[in-house]
Amino acid sequence: MPLKMFISSAPRDSDLARDLEKRLNKAGLQVISPHPTKGVKENVRARIDGEALRAADEVIALLTKNSSDSSWLLFEIGYAASLGKRVTPLIQGIEPKELPKIIKQMEYVRYAGLDKYISKLQRRAEELSRSAA
């Protein structure tokens, strides 16, 4: 059974979210989050009401210059954490000193290190599959 990944991103980062989704799918991981197609507030409500976040094994939060100050993205990260989800910030085009204080305290991944991170996810998925068998 593949790991279910939820991508949290700002609407202005939809191209980056699509690239991430393709890379995760290619690695055999399942992406269950919708891409932002509505306004930010409506999209967040739809995700929370729609069970996608609750069904995820892990949440990847895309942080860029477009989204680092997004209160909705931070809300989604907080909501995921309150559900006990593993949350991994993925940063692109932003320096660590520019990150929100809460994100600085988390273990984040730079977009340049995405392949290594995806390999770790694949190993975790394989371990879960073996233990379930």
Image (spheres, rainbow, N blue to C red):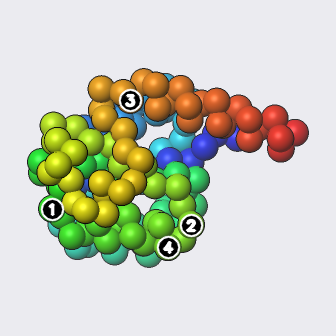
Is the residue marked by circle 1 packed among few (<14), some (14-19), or many (20+) residues within 10 Å?
some
Question: At 49% across and 62% down in the image, what residue appears?
Answer: 52
* N-terminal label among 4 and 1: 1
Q: Say which mark, if any, is on residue 114.
A: 3
Q: Amino acid at mark 1?
A: Asp
Q: Which residue is mark 2?
A: 84
Question: At 37% across and 64% down in the image, what residue appears?
Answer: 77
Is the residue marked by circle 2 packed among few (<14), some (14-19), or many (20+) residues within 10 Å?
few
Specify the quadrant of the image occupied by residue 121. Answer: top right
Q: Amino acid at mark 4?
A: Ser
Labels 2 & 4 near each other (Cβ < 8 A)? yes
Specify the quadrant of the image occupied by residue 85. Answer: bottom right
* N-terminal label among 1 and 3: 1
Q: Which residue is mark 4?
A: 82
* N-terminal label among 2 and 1: 1
Could you tell me residue 98's position as x and y percent?
14, 51
Is the residue marked by circle 4 packed among few (<14), some (14-19), or many (20+) residues within 10 Å?
few
Residue 17, above or below 38: above
Could you tell me residue 31's position as x and y percent?
48, 44
Could you tell me residue 8's position as x and y percent?
34, 55
- Which residue is more in the foreground, 7 or 100? 100
Q: Circle 3 — which element?
A: helix
